[in-house]
Amino acid sequence: MLFLLTGGTAAAINFASRILYNHWLDYSNSIIVAYLTGMVTAFVLARLFVFTETSQNWHRSALIFTLVNMVAVAQTWAISMGLAYYVLPSAGVTRFAPEIAHAAGVAFPVFTSYLGHKHWSFR
């Protein structure tokens, strides 16, 4: 439950920061930078509140956390881009398409990330 709460906070920061970054960056790059912002938030919150009894030090956890998140950012980017530029427009959805697509992209890797972090980042 704590993972969902901390992950939800990080996801909200990811989502909101993408809208902010989109003022200076294109959609594709703002997704990546926003993901990094959310990832730092997620690491700190998960380390402090969820995986408190890890046997790994902060540096090792951060390295493995980053590796697990490389898979998650690829999932987020692919889903966000695919939905925003192909799926939603072909379904006639134009209003808030980038936001809908990015929300789906952010939500998708929640479960794959949890498993990766539980078994590798914070084991």
Image (tube, rainbow, N blue to C red):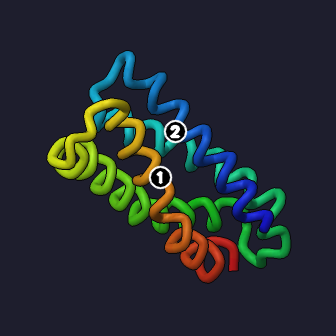
On the rendered structure, is 39 left or right of 7?
Answer: left
Residue at 55 percent across and 32 percent down: it is 16
31 up-or-down from 104: above or below: above
65 up-or-down from 54: above or below: above
On the rendered structure, is 32 left or right of 118?
Answer: left
86 up-or-down from 26: above or below: below
Q: Which mark is residue 75?
A: none
Furthest residue toward front:
92
> Which label's residue is closer to the chain start, 1 or 2?
2
Q: How many marks?
A: 2
On the rendered structure, is 49 left or right of 24?
Answer: right
**Pointer 1 residue:** 106
Q: Nearer the viewer, residue 70 or 8?
A: 8
Q: Residues within 10 Å of mark 2 (few under 14, many from 20)?
A: many
Residue at 50 percent across and 73 percent down: it is 112
- Asked if labels 2 and 1 touch by Cβ distance under 8 angstroms, the answer is yes
Q: Position of residue 18 (x, y in %)?
A: 45, 32
Q: Quadrant of residue 122?
A: bottom right
Q: Position of residue 58 (x, y in %)?
A: 71, 61
Q: Quadrant of residue 33?
A: top left
The quarter of the picture where the N terminus appears is bottom right
Report how far apart the C-alphas of labels 1 and 2 lie in the structure: 7 Å
**Pointer 2 residue:** 15
Mark 2 lies on a secondary structure that is helix
Q: Mark 1: which amino acid? A: Val
Q: Position of residue 103 (x, y in %)?
A: 46, 47
Q: Mark 2: which amino acid? A: Phe
Q: Nearer the viewer, residue 19 or 36?
A: 19
Residue at 45 percent across and 27 percent down: it is 19
Furthest residue toward top:
23
The quarter of the picture where the C terminus appears is bottom right
